[in-house]
Amino acid sequence: MSALLRVAELNAAYAATIDADRLEAWPDFFDEDCLYKITSAENYKRGYSAGIVYADSRAMLRDRVTALRTANIFERQSYRHIVGLPVLGATAADGIAAETPFLVVRIMRDGRTDLFATGVYIDRIHDEGGNLRFAERIVVCDSSHFDTLLAIPL
Amino acid sequence: MPDALLPHPASLPGWKGDLTRVPFWVYRDERLLKLEQERMFEGPVWNFLCLEDEIANPGDWRTTVVGQMPVVVARDADGSIAAFENRCAHRGNLICLDNAGSDARDFQCVYHAWRYDLRGNLRSVAFQRGVRGKGGMPPDFRVEDHGPRQLRITTTHGLVFGTCSDDTPAVEDFIGSDVLARFDRVLGGRKVEIIGRFVEVLPNNWKLYAENARDSYHASLLHLFFATFKLNRLSQGGGLVVSPNGGCSVSETIAPTEADDKSYAGMRSVDDDYRLEDLRLIDVVDEHPDRVRHQIVTVFPNFVLQKTQNAMALRFFTPKAVDRTSLEWIYFGYADDTPEMRKRRLRHLNLGGPAGFVSMEDGCVGGFVQRGIATAENESAIVEMGGAGVAGQPTRASEAAVRGFWSLWREMTGL
């Protein structure tokens, strides 16, 4: 399979995992040492290092899932990710650089369905024996505005 | 604006009773927006405008809002800071369209090219004398007589505040020395550096958020993350400070004692089912001798300075509609942070912001109230924890700071 198809398949599986509320499996898409950050185009352009989510280990991603399941209070909601085709960058020995546009629709408990976020995933993908994992996934949202809260990961 | 255009306080439903009962209509009545704008935001308060560092050089400028009034804040050629309404004196067009800029020598309205200096003084009118002797403004038109409203500026701890009123007391008196002392703790001495900026759009009246920030009672009850990980329990040390005018406050939480730490086996949860796998999310390094781990400072009406563990943020919230509020988060570190400390701050910032382990509930709970009170115009909220007073208390199981907010709000709105 071409690298493009492999990354597209990875993205499809990633989106399906979140949208189907299989969040416990979400950290497995990442390396043990990784960086997952949600930021915005404006912050990214300015080189601001903070994100609204910042996790630099898979354990931290699991902690987020645990907190969402156990501690955090928010109205029941789900996402529908529509993920575009990746644009691949240079392929290094240890992996692939990719940028993939996304659109996320949020469906609230009361049935309200809104466009919640759009943006681009800027990824470094680690290829370990044919197994693709994110060494780095920077979620760059087009807007810096977030409606009410962001609970479920993008 | 002549007062005749404002709703007279007597025409509004009114506030029956004392500060322990907050009538729900105050979160729902659109007429109040106008009254709050004129009497409060444009009244004797210090509105947060920006950080000094954001307009460090002459010609730097930013746009912001004072309530709903668009404002430009700029660094003049002589290094002083000025702010003025972002409204051309001619036809009311926005003078500055972007969020920020630099190297400005003047501002020119895009509509008819009326030109302003960096202090908002009207300097020239395009074709004032007409073209070849025809048209133009009347000979007695003087640019000096026209211009957008200008704000008075003050700075403290690297923050720029502005006021539209001549009656606003000095910022030190407005905030009060006890509250201002907590600014020193976070902003005193060290140069700050902005590391992120995000906006949360809240589905509720702005005052529900103003109360939430002053409400130390809810912290360990709504935010389970805090309680479970012993970051903030009402039984921990700490307390509440309220400024003499009631409107500004500090809520602080002291670190657990060493003995407590041991009894809970580090930062592990008492609930064995729930523990953090990566404790770097909360691995605080004390940067101050006081062992305060969580500090929320509020300044009336709509500003918050926060330090939680090693994460620091400013919050600034403004009404967009009676049931919609824009909450801006400005994350910052210190310019001289070590790389390790900077990463620690980035991790601890997971507690705050729109996706914060602790603060995400603050984003939605205001909307729950806004919906809950849909038809409760004649009912009131109960704000009686810690009694009826507005003075600070050595406990956080108190709503004194919320009552303090309302006491100053009532003074300003006349309700």
Image (cartoon, coloured by chain):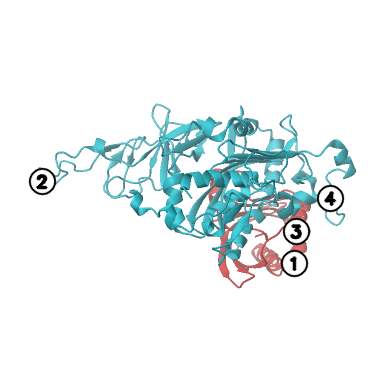
Chain colours: A red, B cyan
**Foreground label between 1 and 2:** 2
Rounded to the nearest angstrom, the CA distance separating label 4 from label 2 is 81 Å
Quick check: can you spot residue B344?
yes
Q: Could you tell me the amino acid type at mark 2?
A: Lys
Task: Indicate which disc, 1 or 3, sits on the residue closer to the N terminus.
Answer: 1
**Foreground label between 4 and 1:** 4
Q: Nearer the viewer, residue A44 or B155?
A: B155
Chain containing mark 3: A
Pinpoint residue A145: horizontal percent, then vertical percent. 54, 55
Quick check: can you spot residue A33?
no
Q: Nearer the viewer, residue B390 or A18?
A: B390
Q: Element under label 1?
A: loop
Bin the neighbour count of mark 2 within 10 Å (Cα to Cα): few under 14, some 14-19, many 20 and up. Answer: few
Res. B208 image quadrant:
bottom right
Left or right for B131, reference B271: left
Toward the bottom, the furthest residue is: A111
Bin the neighbour count of mark 4 within 10 Å (Cα to Cα): few under 14, some 14-19, many 20 and up. Answer: some
Q: Is residue B185 above or below residue B315?
A: above
Pinpoint residue B234: horizontal percent, then vertical percent. 76, 46
Please give the name of the residue rendered at 39% of the width and 26% of the height, measured from the top-left corner.
B78
Residue bearing the label numbered 4: B269
Q: Are marks 3 and 4 on the same chain?
A: no
Please give the name of the residue rendered at 59% of the width and 49% of the height, measured from the top-left corner.
B19
Rounded to the nearest angstrom, the CA distance separating label 2 from label 3 is 72 Å
Which mark is drawn over residue A22? 1
Q: Element under label 2?
A: loop
Residue bearing the label numbered 2: B134
